[in-house]
Each structure stands twice: as C-alpha cells, then as structure tokens.
Image (tube, grey):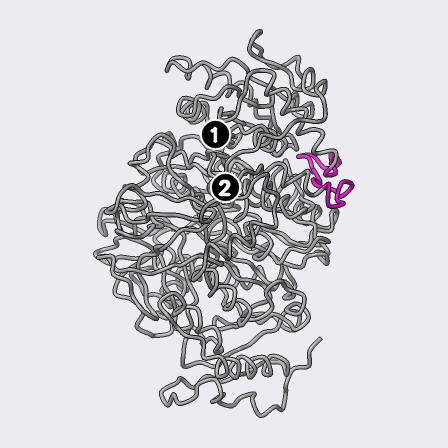
C-alpha cells in the first residue's frame, strides 16, 4: 500500500506545475494524495512538455487528461483518493488507480491511452486491422478495412468494416480458444433460480453442445441467412443457441423471455424465422412463468398475419415445469432433450463475410413499432471483444459475471460474445438478485470467486466477503455521484475501479468508458471515448461546441461495432439516426422532442452556485474533457412554468444519507400543471417515517429550491427494472397517476412483484 503524504510540500498547497503560465487557473489544492500519485502527476506534466502532442481537430477534447482534473466546484480543494487506500466521500473526489493496478493494466497511463487513441482516429483502418488480425479469418479482407458515408446529403448512409474478409464468430469464441489450450477451462458457470441448482461447461463441452444444436438446425432446414427467434431464459441453452446459429450463418433474434405474446408476435412477423427456440417454463423467484403458453399465443397471432413457423424447439426446464404439464402441438413442437443430443458433436463452420448479418435485436421506437437493429459479423466481433478486454481490464485468471439478460444488447456483447472471444469464464444466472433474499448476488460472487462484476449498482450488501472482486462495472442507467461512491466504497471496499460506461444497442459496445488503470475517475462521469470513437457535442443547429459545454451528443465517423441498418427499413434508420444532425450519428431517439434531463455534472455545479446551463440537455463535457450523460431522452417536468429535470431531483434525494435510490416522474396537478412524484428506496434497515419524508423533501428544497420539492414521496422497497438495470418509468407514471388498469405488460421486469409492492404502498 502506498504511503500518504502527510507533510509533503504538495499537500494543502497550490500545484503550479500543473498550470504553467496560467495566472487565472483556479486555486486547486490537494487535500489528500499519495507520494506516488504526486510523482505520477509530475511525470504527466513533463511528458506533456516533452511531447507537445498536437491538439488537432480529432484530439482536442482528450489531451486535457494530461493535467490533473478539476473538481466539479472549481473553487474547492481537490480530494484525491487512491484505490485501496481511502473511501470516496466528496463530490469533487478524484479516484486514481493504484500503482500496482496501473502497472498490470492493459492501458496503464494517460500517455499510453493518448498514443493508442491518436492512432485509432487518425488511422482507423490500420488500428482496427491490427486488432482484427488477432482473430481467425479464413480469408483476409481484400480492400480497405473500412468505408463509410455518414452524410445523407451525399447518398445512402453506409458503414462497412473488413468487407471481403471471411470469418465466423462462433469459431473465434470456441474453436480458437480450444486450439490455444483452453479446452478444459470453464466457459460457463451456471447458477439456477433456486439455490443448490448449478452446472458448468468447459470450452470443449460447450463446443460439443453448440455443434449438436447446429446440426439439428441444419437438419430442419435452417440455412445461412435464415432467421431463428430465441425466446429463452438465462439457461446455458441461451448462449448455446446464439452460438449455434452463428456457427451455421443463421441470424439469431433473441427476445427477452418475459415479453408478452403480442411483442413476441411482432418480432416473429418482422423477421419471419424458420424456427422458434424456447423452453416450457421458467421460475422467477418463487413464481413459475409458462413461456411455452406465451410462444403458442404469439405463433397463433403470427399465423393470422400470414407468418407460419414450422418448428418450435422446446427445452424442458424441469425445475419450473414437467413436460406432462406443457401444452403441445404435434407436428410443430419438438422437445430439445429428445432430439438435439442425438446429433454429432462436430459441425462444419459456415464461413461468412464480415458484413453478413449476425443478429437482429429489437428495441423500442418512438412510433410504437419495434426497431430491428441489425449487427453484422466481423466488425461486431472485433469491437465487442476489444471493449470487453480494455474496459474491464480482463485477465485470463478472471471470473466474470454480468447480471444482464441475453435478451438485451448487454447480454449479447458482455455475456456471450465479448467474454468468450477473450476466453473468459462467465457466470450465467437464471434467477433474480433478491431471491431467496437480498444477498443472493453476493452468495454467487463468493461461490464462484467473481473478480469482474458488471451490474446495476443498487443491490444490497450484507454479510458477504466479496474479496475476489477486482473491477466493477455499472450497467443500466448512468449512476449519480452518490450512488457511484456507494458502489465504490461499500461493494468494492474502495479497491475496485468502476467502469461506468455509456453505449447503446445500436453501438454494439462501449463508446465512452473509463479504462481502469489509465486515468483518475470522477464519480458519475463516463470519462473519455473508447478507441476509434469520436464524440462531439452540438447545439440545436448542429454546430459543434468547443471546450467545456453542454448539448446534444453525436458521433462523427464510424466504429467497427456500429449497427448497419434497421431491418427492412433503411429509410427509418437514416431518418432516426442521421438526419437530425447532418453528417453525424445522433445518439438520441431521432425526431422526438429535443428536451432532456440536466446531467449530474451541471447539477453539481448549480448546487455549488456556478453558472452551468440555460437549459436541459443529455450530455456535457467538463473543462477536463470528461463526459457526463443522463442516459435518457425524456420529458422534463414543468412545474408552474419551471422546467425541472428529474435527474436533478433524483440526485438531490440520493444525497440524503438514508436514501439508497430514487426515481422521479411528473403527474398532473390542477394548480401547478405538473407535480413532482418521487419513488424512494431507503438504505438497508432504515424504517419509513413521516419525519424522514419531511427530511427528504427539505433536502431537495435546500439543494435546488422550493419549486422542485416533491409533492409526494412514495416509499419503494424496489424499483421496476429490466434485467439490464433500466428503470421502467412508464410503470411508475401509471402508478403515480393511479392508472392501475393501464400498467401494461410487467412480465419483462427482473422482479415483477415490485409493482405489487409499490401499489400496496401508494397511500403510505
């Protein structure tokens, strides 16, 4: 452990070597920092003087990391924290990697990152070609590694990476790892819904299972380019099915096994699959969900729309339902266990072009019709593997667990493909994080000695060790600074860096993310762009804004993991993502109202009396180049003419020491137009009380103003979330408005029973 500098000339004094020839630099003081950290800062400065790296158009917003970042409040002292040495406690914390962590990291310094980033944006074809060459290609691409048109005014939008190269992502996930000596390494640790049910597969065993299913699919007529819909819970058979489709060149479309029959039918009608793969039932907590009944209803609805599916392959999940209790249609329905294991354990690989489709993943659109996001093979393979390796600083000895479901993009990129392309041991969990009690996740962490944990950071920590944890990742919505510090201090014992990432279904992988050993983190900030990613912030007219600013986040130039189109609707693809700001990929939801939340950085600034912004926005870049995002495109609340970002109110609420989490929605108010309705989850063990309710409201009044005080505090044991950590605010709005008959489908939630609890507590 490093020795803090208690009497150093640097502690409590100005650090002029950070700001040469800058008489107007803020009085940034170091209140807590180690000897090695001071030396690192000194070396960074002299490195900058030696190299004088040109801050050209592509690098102007990243070279700032060579100076010590400022605090959110520029007039306050810096409070530097080193991993493993101290807790994060202030809103202006800087969390530095320790020397030991940085030495072993894939990217160990700002200088190394800048050198790699510089090449990735100045020579993207060369940069990504070098990385792509680490994978197996039956035939290398015979033309430039990338070609693109991001400007609809110059023709159709087009993105291509490694066109002409022949590869197979399943081969790279399994065969390549086996050939490199990992045949007996555990590929999947599986944990069932009920404690005591567990299993595992080595890479060799996994390949056998994948080949058997691949051979079965070929035998029933699935060919290269055909679609297969997968409607499975988090059994090992889910990644097996994904990899089996990829092995034979089929296009899989995983649908979260909780979507309603209507939602499933929409996806079946759109992609016209040859086969639907499901299981008869799944247990979520103590409740059994009959998935086969949902599939039957969806197939009947699809048939009414002219789309018939000849084969429904059904896995018997005996812990949830025996086959005798499963409804059956002879001639269409087939039991997995009766047929698939009879097929050979070797299957010829279908070598596909890098630009051939890999999967369809449907995401909600503003028009109501789901958008079929289409990802292709080569670029997605390279990008998902590379982002996994660097953002989590993955090492071969790590055991990795992402709690997201494969029905979402997180499960595609960071449960199946990204980890297995790196030869990782992956935990797959069928159940819910609070069953049979709130410590289930930590039981699993301790059991499998998980070292990289990627989750929604709102889980309870009780009596568990968690000593194996090395890196934490935040999935779902961006976490505010208070939640970040809780995740860092409590879950990670202040020794685990946090990869708080920003990305989308459409991007295929992380776009803005900390690299754990490379630079100091600011709680609540996604920090800097990943290699090859060029984020810009524009105003409402699409003009790029320089330096410290806020506005609309766009991307210029493509990256390998970018989706190529919306299935069957390229016009909608261009209109939604490329026409709002010509020449850029727009990260919002197209032509919806451009009203956004206030980001956490600007919230902190406004709290400290600084001028931050004249309006609300989805993204800002601070003076150090760090990015802050709300992660939501949503309406603001208009209270008596005051436009209030719900993220502002949420951040104020969670700053209260007894508040663990908060979600705020607007409701109709006969006097104010809209009122503020807050759902509040208390810290573990804290009882509900009227005194606490008043204290929470007072906290908001003090931090923001009386106009932002919640009209209602609704006690919430938990919030309705998807398996990927997204809060379902539409459900909260219906509960707040007492429109309980309009809640819609709640089966997609990780814990559907939370809705019933919220309804019961509505009048408390």
Q: Earlier in the sequence, mark 2 or mark 1?
A: 1
Residues 25 and 762: in front is 25
Label of residue 133 in the image:
none
Q: Quadrant of the N terminus?
A: bottom right
Under tag 2, what secondary structure?
helix
> Can residue 299 be seen from the camera position used here?
yes
Is residue 474 found left or right of 601 in the rendered image? right
Q: Is residue 376 magenta?
A: no
Labels 2 and 1 touching (C-beta < 8 A): no
Furthest-right residue in view?
Answer: 184
Q: What residue is pinned by disc 2?
A: 409
Furthest-front residue in view?
Answer: 142
Label of residue 259 in the image:
1
Q: Residue 552: image x %, image y %?
A: 31, 57
Residue at image coords 69%, 15%: 338
Residues 288 and 558: in front is 558
Residue at image coords 52%, 56%: 660
Indicate whether 701 appears above or below 136: below
Residues 711 and 663: in front is 663
Crowd tier of the residue under label 1, counting other residues whose Cα lies within 10 Å: few below 14, some 14–19, many 20 or above: some
> Can residue 481 be seen from the camera position used here?
no
Marker count (numbered): 2
Q: Which residues are magenta?
A: 178-203
């Amino acid at each position: 452990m490093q020795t803090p500098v208690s009497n150093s000339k640097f502690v409590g004094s100005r650090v002029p070597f950070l700001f040469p020839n800058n008489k107007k630099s803020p009085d940034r003081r170091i209140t807590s920092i180690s000897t090695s950290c001071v030396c690192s800062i000194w070396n960074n400065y002299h490195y900058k003087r030696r190299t004088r790296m040109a801050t050209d158009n592509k690098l102007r917003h990243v070279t700032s990391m060579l100076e010590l970042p400022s605090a959110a409040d520029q007039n306050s002292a810096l409070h530097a924290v080193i991993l493993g040495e101290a807790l994060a406690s202030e809103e202006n914390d800087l969390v530095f990697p320790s020397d030991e962590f940085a030495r072993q990291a894939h990217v160990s310094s700002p200088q190394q990152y800048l050198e790699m980033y510089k090449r990735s944006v100045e020579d993207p074809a060369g940069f990504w070609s070098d990385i792509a060459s680490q994978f197996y290609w039956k035939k290398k691409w015979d033309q430039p590694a990338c070609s693109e048109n991001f400007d609809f005014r110059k023709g159709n939008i087009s993105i291509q990476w490694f066109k002409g190269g022949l590869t197979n992502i399943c081969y790279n996930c399994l065969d390549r790892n086996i050939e490199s000596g990992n045949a007996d390494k555990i590929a999947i640790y599986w944990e069932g819904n009920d404690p005591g049910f567990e299993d595992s597969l080595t890479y060799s065993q996994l390949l056998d299972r994948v080949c058997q299913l691949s051979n079965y699919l070929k035998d029933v007529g699935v060919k290269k380019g055909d679609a297969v819909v997968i409607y499975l819970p988090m059994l090992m058979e889910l990644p097996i099915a994904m990899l089996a489709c990829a092995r034979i060149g089929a296009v899989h479309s995983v649908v979260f096994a909780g979507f309603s029959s209507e939602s499933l039918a929409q996806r079946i009608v759109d992609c016209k699959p040859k086969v639907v793969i499901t299981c008869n039932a799944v247990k979520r907590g103590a409740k059994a969900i009959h998935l086969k009944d949902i599939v039957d209803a969806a197939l009947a609805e699809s048939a009414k729309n002219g789309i018939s599916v000849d084969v429904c392959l059904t896995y018997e999940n005996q812990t949830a339902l025996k086959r005798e209790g499963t409804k059956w249609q002879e001639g269409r329905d087939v039991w997995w266990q009766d047929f698939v294991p009879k097929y050979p354990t070797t299957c010829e690989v279908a070598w596909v072009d890098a630009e051939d489709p890999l999967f369809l993943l449907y995401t909600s659109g503003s028009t109501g019709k789901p958008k079929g996001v289409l990802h292709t093979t080569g670029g997605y393979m390279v990008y998902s593997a590379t982002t996994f390796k660097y953002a989590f600083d993955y090492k071969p000895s790590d055991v990795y667990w992402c709690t997201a479901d494969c029905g979402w993009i997180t499960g595609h990129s960071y449960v199946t493909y990204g980890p297995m392309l790196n030869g990782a041991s992956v935990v797959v969990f069928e159940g819910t994080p609070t069953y049979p009690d709130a410590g289930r996740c930590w039981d699993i962490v301790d059991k499998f000695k998980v070292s990289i944990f990627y989750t929604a950071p709102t889980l309870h920590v009780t009596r568990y060790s968690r000593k194996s944890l090395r890196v934490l990742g935040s999935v779902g919505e961006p976490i505010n600074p208070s939640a970040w510090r809780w995740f860092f201090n409590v879950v990670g014992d202040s020794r685990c860096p946090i990869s708080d990432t920003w990305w989308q279904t459409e991007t295929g992988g992380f776009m803005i993310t900390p690299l754990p050993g490379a630079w100091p983190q600011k709680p609540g900030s996604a920090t800097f762009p990943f290699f090859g990613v060029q984020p810009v912030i524009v105003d409402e007219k699409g003009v790029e804004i320089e330096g410290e600013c806020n506005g609309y986040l766009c991307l210029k130039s493509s990256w390998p993991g970018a989706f190529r189109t919306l299935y069957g609707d390229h016009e909608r693809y261009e209109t939604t993502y490329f026409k709002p700001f010509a020449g850029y990929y727009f990260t919002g939801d197209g032509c919806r109202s451009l009203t956004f939340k206030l980001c956490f950085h600007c919230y902190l600034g406004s709290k400290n009396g600084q001028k931050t912004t004249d309006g609300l926005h989805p993204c800002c870049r601070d003076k150090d180049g760090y990015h802050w995002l709300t992660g939501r495109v949503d309406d603001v609340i208009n209270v008596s003419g005051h436009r209030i970002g719900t993220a502002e109110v949420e951040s104020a609420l969670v700053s209260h020491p007894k508040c663990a989490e908060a979600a705020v929605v607007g409701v109709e108010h006969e006097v104010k137009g809209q009122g503020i309705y807050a759902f509040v989850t208390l810290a573990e063990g804290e009882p509900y009380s009227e005194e606490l309710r008043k204290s929470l409201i007072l906290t908001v009044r003090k931090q923001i103003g009386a106009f932002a005080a919640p009209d209602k505090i609704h006690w919430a044991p938990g919030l309705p979330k998807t398996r990927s950590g997204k809060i379902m605010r539409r459900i909260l709005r219906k509960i707040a408005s007492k429109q309980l008959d309009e809640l819609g489908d709640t089966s997609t939630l990780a814990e559907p029973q939370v809705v019933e609890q919220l309804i019961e507590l509505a009048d408390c």
